[in-house]
């Protein structure tokens, strides 16, 4: 065999080996990748049936204070405006079981209650402690109210696939929801607050651009049931289910 041919064959094998090495390096995440990380994120709440307060029950009236309804009245679901979401997270995957970790995250949103027609129903025979109420149903246009929610998920249980640069993951854990409503209707101005524990579930994917820097996107589902007391200015107390779907993306740094 001629030397030129030998060199060409050897060169071809070398190029294939080089490309194979590059391919493997692009697919595999180095074992040196650190397991602690932080991240910042922005996102938005989705429109749809999940973007409203549902199963709204009127629990008490403001005049006189402590006028509790038995049985409770009801109200049609109140639509929420789509809201930007800002937040951050810090997490850690355990070296000996590097597909499992814990994560703390917190985020802030303002899904304001939109103005719109709302039906209020009081059942016949409803007893009001300390007051009186007329039974029946009425539909009025309620003004929009300012609504703020801070969500703190203290320990998400995280499961991931970590054999490649792109790593899908799921997370689930309890969350603390701190909410505040500011009523804008003239004559009924006031604030109502409620802090409840609920559920935080998310599905996402993370891509490592370098050993330390990654980008990620995730879809999150929250669930809780708020309990707002009546305001002294005339706003009634109520309970309501809050279960938004949130899409967010962000950048992470791995130590």
Image (cartoon, grey):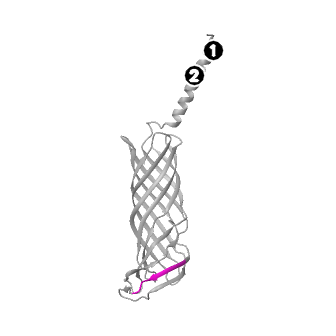
Q: Is mark 2 on a helix, strand or loop?
A: helix
- Location of residue 35 (image quadrant): top left
Find the residue positioned furthest to the front: 124
The quarter in which the C terminus is drawn is top left
Where are the magenta residues, as a range?
117-124
Above or below, 110 against 166 in this view is: below
- Location of residue 48 (image quadrant): bottom right
The residue at 48%/68% (across/down) is 148
Above or below, 25 against 185 in this view is: above
Image coords of residue 250 (percent x, y): 52, 52
Question: Foreground: 180 or 10?
Answer: 10
Residue contact between numbered discs 2 and 1, judged by CB atoms under 8 Å:
no
Residue bearing mark 1: 5
Q: Is mark 1 on a helix, strand or loop?
A: helix
Q: Which mark is residue 182?
A: none
**How far separated are the C-alphas under marks 2 and 1?**
12 Å
Image coords of residue 59 (percent x, y): 40, 79
Image coords of residue 71 (percent x, y): 37, 81
The residue at 63%/14% (across/down) is 5
Residue bearing mark 2: 13
Image coords of residue 199 (percent x, y): 40, 61
């Amino acid at each position: 065999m001629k030397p030129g041919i030998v060199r060409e064959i050897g060169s071809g094998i070398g190029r294939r080996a080089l490309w194979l090495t590059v391919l493997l390096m692009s697919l595999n995440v180095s074992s040196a990748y650190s397991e602690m990380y932080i991240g910042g994120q922005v996102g938005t709440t989705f429109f749809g049936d999940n973007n409203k307060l549902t199963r709204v029950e009127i629990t008490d009236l403001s005049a006189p204070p402590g006028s509790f309804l038995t049985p409770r009245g009801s109200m049609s679901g109140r639509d929420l405006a789509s809201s930007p979401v800002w937040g951050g997270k810090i997490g850690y995957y355990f070296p000996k079981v590097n597909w499992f970790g814990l994560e703390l995250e917190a985020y802030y949103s303002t899904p304001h209650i939109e103005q719109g027609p709302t039906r209020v129903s009081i059942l016949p025979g409803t007893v009001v402690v300390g007051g009186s109420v007329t039974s029946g149903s009425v539909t009025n246009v309620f003004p929009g109210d300012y609504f703020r929610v801070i969500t703190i998920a203290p320990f998400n249980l995280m499961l991931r696939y970590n054999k490649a640069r792109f790593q899908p993951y799921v997370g689930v854990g309890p969350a603390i929801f701190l909410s505040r409503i500011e009523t804008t209707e003239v004559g009924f101005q006031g604030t109502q607050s409620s802090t409840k524990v609920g559920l935080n579930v998310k599905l996402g994917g993370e891509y490592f651009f370098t050993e330390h820097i990654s980008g990620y996107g995730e879809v999150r589902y929250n669930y809780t049931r708020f309990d707002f007391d009546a305001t002294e200015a005339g706003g009634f107390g109520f309970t309501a289910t809050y279960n938004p779907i949130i899409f967010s993306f962000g950048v992470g740094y791995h130590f």
